Amino acid sequence: MKRASAAAYLELSPAEFEREVAAGRLPQPFRLGNHEHWSKDAIDKAIARLSGEQVASWRDRSGLYGQTG
């Protein structure tokens, strides 16, 4: 989705959306044609990570990296 749609999806102004991307809290865009686009899936994953709802990564589940259980 383009910048305006991604910002609206998150109920952010375009300026707020850009600040979150620049800060690394939201994903970087990719180029499609002559425009920047954002993946809805990547945005959803970033929001899950920020909200603490992210599913544990394979590293966490493996138990090989200091995690137990």
Image (cartoon, rainbow, N blue to C red):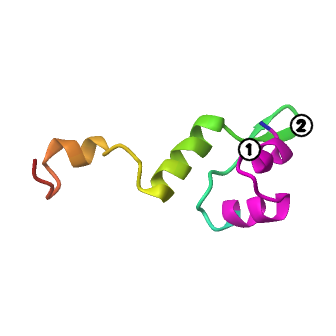
Crowd tier of the residue under label 2, counting other residues whose Cα lies within 10 Å: few below 14, some 14–19, many 20 or above:
few
Viewer-side residue, 56 vs 23: 56
Residue 9 is labelled as 1
Type of amino acid under label 1: Tyr
Check disc 2 and report the residue beneath it: 34
Vertical position of residue 20 compared to residue 32: above or below = below
Viewer-side residue, 42 vs 52: 52
Type of amino acid under label 2: Asn
Q: Secondary structure at mark 1?
A: helix
- Decide whether the magenta segment is chiefly helix, strand or loop: helix
> Which residue is at a point 84% across and 58% down the rendered structure image?
14
The magenta-colored residue range is 2-21
Which quadrant: the N terminus?
Answer: top right
Residue 23: percent from left, percent from top? 64, 68
Q: Secondary structure at mark 2?
A: loop
Q: Are marks 2 and 1 in contact (CB under 8 Å)?
A: no
Q: In the shown orientation, is residue 29 left or right of residue 66?
A: right
Residue 59: percent from left, percent from top? 25, 46
Query: Is residue 3 one of those drawn in magenta?
Result: yes
Q: In the shown orientation, is residue 63 left or right of residue 22?
A: left
Q: In the shown orientation, is residue 4 left or right of residue 64?
A: right
Vertical position of residue 54 compared to residue 41: above or below = below
Query: Is residue 43 one of those drawn in magenta?
Result: no
Residue 44: percent from left, percent from top? 57, 42
